[in-house]
Image: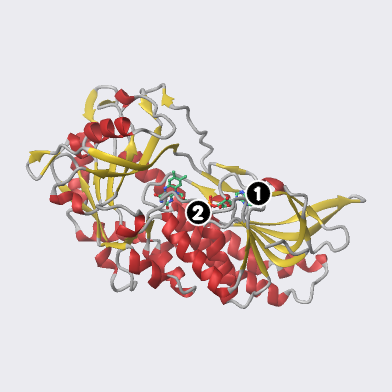
Amino acid sequence: MSLPERVEILIVGAGPTGLACALSLDTHGCTDIVVVDAYEHGEDSSRAIAVHAATLEALYTVGCADALIEVGIQEPTFRLWDGSRLHTVADFTSLTEYTKYPFVLIIPQYVTERILGEKVREKGVRVVRPKRVVGLKINEHDTNMTDVLFESGEVIQARYVIGADGARSTVRQATGIKFSDPNGEIPSSEVDSSNGTVTQAILADVMFTEPLPSELARMLFILSGDSPFLFIPLPPEAYDEQGTVYRIGGGIPAAMGAPPPSPPISYLQELVDLSGPGAVKLSGDSTKLTISKTLWSTRFRTHSAIADTFFTRLGWTQGGQYYSGGAVLLIGDAAHIHSPAGGQGMNLGIRDAISLGAALATHRSVTEPVVAPSEYRRLDMPLKEWADHRRQQGLTVIALTKRMLSFAMARPATTWYLGVIPVNWCMLRNFVLGIATSFSATRRAAAWRLSGLGNR
Ligand SMILES: Cc1cc2nc3c(=O)[nH]c(=O)nc-3n(C[C@H](O)[C@H](O)[C@H](O)COP(=O)(O)OP(=O)(O)OC[C@H]3O[C@@H](n4cnc5c(N)ncnc54)[C@H](O)[C@@H]3O)c2cc1C
């Protein structure tokens, strides 16, 4: 499919947020849309595997929730093993009075993208691949339009450009919008020299030689020592394999050193033995698990950043006067990134995308036919309000993921309170956890936060 010369709405990036945005715009009556992506095919790695209640509610409005629920696994709780006790940290079933989705849905990201992509095709929205955007500039003849420049030399004029092009967003960079940690933190090196802990983490989809203890038949988070470990059975649709595939992942014990780019089976096995199920006694016996196959593995460093604004207009100065041009919006990882703690990233992005559909449709209705730039300040309100609201939601999620990570991540076993009282961090953490999770109100509050229902 070739690119048109002109389109009303150009979405850059056909990841989960770009596709969800196209569906939402279509639902709100915007039909002149083109989605472009730099690659011929979508990513086929599982990455985000949790879809929360607020995201399912948003996906319901674009006709995709049922298809996801049909293939995903519904997890009613978030359980944590502290090395000797099982805690229910979040109880999603307690949310029944607030949502028709009182669970977290386990489904690999590429299956979510496949379902969104099928819906986009069914709606007849144009997706053009491979087309890489390399820059933006104000159209010389019509300042309401942006010229979007492609690596191929092609140019499209668009009235709205939506950057759904991921963490390294070309759209964001072309507008000069700053992207930084809201608390001014700087991403650390591979090993934190202050305490010797590894600042990277790994994720992998693997198979084990069976049988597995019954506790591992469902999602389980293990905090046996100083590194957190995640264990999640994936739905059969995840891979074309005989037997269950599991998502594993977590922090790296200092003894293992920095991980290689795609950690091999031997490295993953060591991690399972040191801080995963192999390091704890489940069902009363020590748990020896042997990985039989690795289907996907990656390492990553967790850091957070948020764009200064999610909406801008390309601007230029002439004769000492500043002028505003075409509208540019950011959604998903182009607008915010953070650690995968609590599985929030894709969820937040999809909710940005679906809420933008309504805001943009309102903006379009008040600015048609095209208005004079002097009117932008007044008429851009729907987009400004959408951008401020979504940025606030981004900040809330970043703060949540930082708190979760700081609670779970490695610390020296003993720290000195006031310099004189020795405190065993892991024992203290597990003690606090035991008390907190014994209350149903705490379990419900945790489920509420993770579900995104208070953060729609
Ligand atoms: C290893 C890993 C593990 C993760 N785990 C989780 C998890 O457990 N839970 C969770 O919620 N999130 C997780 N995430 C984050 C989640 O994957 C992202 O939040 C999600 O993919 C964001 O979607 P997006 O559509 O905004 O961006 P992306 O998925 O990055 O999609 C961007 C799209 O834009 C295209 N593109 C980029 N540049 C251009 C260009 N110049 N021109 C045209 N097209 C372009 C790309 O090809 C891509 O298709 C993880 C991410 C990674 C990398």
The secondary element bearing badge 2 is classed as: helix
Measure the alpha-carbon separation of dots 2 and 1. Answer: 16 Å
> Nearest the camera: 428 or 230?
230
**Which residue corresponds to the image point at 43% horizontal and 44% vertical from the top-left?**
339
Q: Position of residue 108 (x, y in %)?
A: 39, 55
**Residue 75 or 352: which is nearer the viewer?**
75
Q: Where is residue 141 in the image (x, y as percent from the top left)?
A: 88, 62
Which residue was labeled with disc 2?
Answer: 394
Nearer to us: label 2 or label 1: 1
Task: For the N terminus, give its image quadrant.
Answer: bottom right
Q: Is mark 1 within 8 Å of ligand 1?
A: no
The amino acid pointed to by label 2 is Gly
Q: In this view, does 10 lie to the left or right of 412?
A: right
Q: Residues within 10 Å of mark 2 (few under 14, many from 20)?
A: many
Q: Mark 1 points at which residue?
A: 172
Q: Which amino acid does label 1 sit on?
A: Arg
Identify the residue shown where x is 53% and y is 41%. Answer: 181
Could you tell me residue 337's position as x and y percent?
50, 47
Q: Which of these two is toward me, 397 or 416?
A: 397
